[in-house]
Each structure stands twice: as structure tokens, then as C-alpha cells.
Image: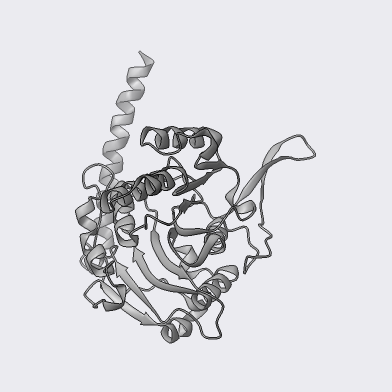
Amino acid sequence: GKYSTPRPLISAIVEGMRPDKKGVVCDPACGTGGFLLEAYHYIRQHNKLDKKELTHLSHHGVRGVELVDSVARLCCMNMILHGIGNDPEHVPIMVKDALAARHGEYDLVLTNPPFGKKSSVPIVNQQGESQKESLIIHRDDFWATTSNKQLNFLQHVFSILKQHGRSAIVVPDNVLFEGGAGETVRRELLKQADVHTLLRLPTGIFYAQGVKANVLFFDKKPAAAEPWTKELWIYDLRTNIHFTLKENTLKRSDLDGFVHSYNPENRHERRESKRFKKFSYQELLKRDKANLDIFWLKDESLEDADNLPEPKVIAREIVKDLKVALKEFEKIEKGLKR
């Protein structure tokens, strides 16, 4: 369930979010600390820090939570090598289950929680056999009770943000369209936060092939009668865009268009483009189950399907390939008998 976040993506997210030197950045699923280190370096590179500000940044400016001991140790070592947390009284990484309870309030949350639809715990049944049981998170500060790990992390991120705190969280597609608890969480998030940006990520950038993920950006707001989300801007970096982990890897320049469209200097002065569209709160609510999995570009791969050969031609080619493969296996079998 652990997927390393591509460094170019981390860099683009941090550049869009522009962490502040006076705030505290948190990653509640920090892994080896990619988001925290990028935020730390961004603050140092874009600010002139006096001694007091540098001390705050090094000792209090970044906070992470990691469940796995060995990964947390790697993260701590990573932090120390970059000049963070070398004071034993201010260790920046907590080793605990982030979802168990709130662990503070933060100005900025940047995270890519572990993928995997359901949380589970190992148990030993009456027959003495080891098995996993779904773990349903019960928290009074959550809108919905569910075993869906991503929905729980999304609710958790909202809970640990300060008022007017900002967040960017990587979520799989099911968070955008799943019914039941998913619909409840989306509707409440749209009401209680300003959910302003969604980045649809291309496939081929995570180690698990075929993973479809997105980055959801939102700001936490005070309680109000009217919903805080006025319009959601969606940037489609997926349709007709393909990457691989070796031959065609994601580069930082591939995200320049998104960062430019995100307009970090003033996101209220955005402009629509071919890949960047806005949808009003009313339009979102009219969609079935408040589905946020929205796309509008024509998928060229579907057009190619219309030009495929006749089924009998495809079948003939498959049979030919299978015959060739069978002959190769027969040669291997003969070689093993010798």
C-alpha cells in the first residue's frame, strides 16, 4: 500500500502551495519525508531567515507522522542530514497511527497517504490462523464512519488544519466518485472547506502500474451558513498523456503548465484553458453523488479503437503468437529432459 511520490510532483505541489516561514508544515503519512524536505528547502530558498526564524524552521517548522518504525528512522535520518531535527528535544517525526486521533493543528498539510481501499489489522482467529480484519475508524470529528483508508485520511487532514489552513492531498479516483461514506465526505468538504483545485494525474508515475490518482487542494474555513466552495478548478494532466517509470518518466517541466494555471501569486485571477476548467458549486451538487471525477477532453485511445482490425484478424494473430510461444516452450522442455 506504499507508493513513493514522484519528486517532480512534490516540487510542483510545494511551488503551488508556497509554504510560509512562520507556519508549520505537516505530513501525517510522511514516509521518508519527501514533502517535508521539499517544503523546508522552498522556505529557505525563498526567504531571508534570521537566527530566530531559522531555529523555528529547523525545530518546529516541519512535522511528520509515520506508522512504520523502520521508515520513521529513515525519515529522521533524512531530516538530520538536511539540518532538521538534530535537537533530541525537538524530533520532527512521530511514530504512531495518524488516524487514531488528532496530533496537533497545522498551517499547511502536504501528504500522499498510503493507497489501498480498506484499513485492516492482523488478528489470529479461533483456529489459530492469521488473517486481516477491516478496521473501521470511529472518530467524533469525522463526518462519516468507514474502513476506507483514503476517506479517513481526507477527513483527518481536514481535522488537523488550523482555521484558514491549507492542504494538498493525493487521493485515488474512488475518493472522487464512491457513494455512501464517500458522498458524505465530499458534500461536507465542499461545504466546510474551500475546495478550489483538483489535479488529475497521469498514469505511469507510481510504482504500482495503472494507479489513477489526483491531487486535491482545499483550505479550511470557519463555520458558516453558506458553503465555502464557490468553484472547483480542474486541471486534466491525464487524458492523452502517458508516462512510464523508465523510458518516459515524469519531469518537473511536465508540470509547468499546471503550476502556471494554478497561479500561486493569486489563484483568484485564473483563466480557463484547454486542460483547465472551472465548475461552480451548484454544478458539482447536481452531479450524481456529488461526483468530482470530471473530464471533458476527448480520449484519443478511444478513437483508435474504431480503427482496430476485424475480430477474426485479431484472433488469427493471437493463434499465430500462441503457436510460436508453444514451440519455444517445447524446446525448453526438451532441453530439461537431457
- Residue at (37, 74) in percent of width and height: 294
Q: Is residue 113 left or right of residue 208?
A: right
Q: Is residue 67 left or right of residue 295?
A: right
Residue 264 image position (x, y, % from top left): 28, 66
Residue 263 image position (x, y, % from top left): 26, 69
Residue 296 visible here = no
Residue 86 image position (x, y, % from top left): 45, 34
Specify the quadrant of the image occupied by residue 166: bottom left
Q: Is residue 255 left or right of residue 103?
A: left
Colour scheme in use: one colour
Nearest the eye: 178 or 42: 42
Residue 232 visible here = yes
Residue with the most extreme front position? 51
Query: Which of the image's four quarters has the C terminus?
Result: top left
Specify the quadrant of the image occupied by residue 12: bottom left
Picture layout, residue 226 above or below residue 52: below
Picture layout, residue 63 above or below residue 187: above
Residue 208 image position (x, y, % from top left): 40, 46
Nearest the eye: 58 or 293: 58
- Residue at (21, 64) in percent of width and height: 257
Residue with the most extreme right position? 126
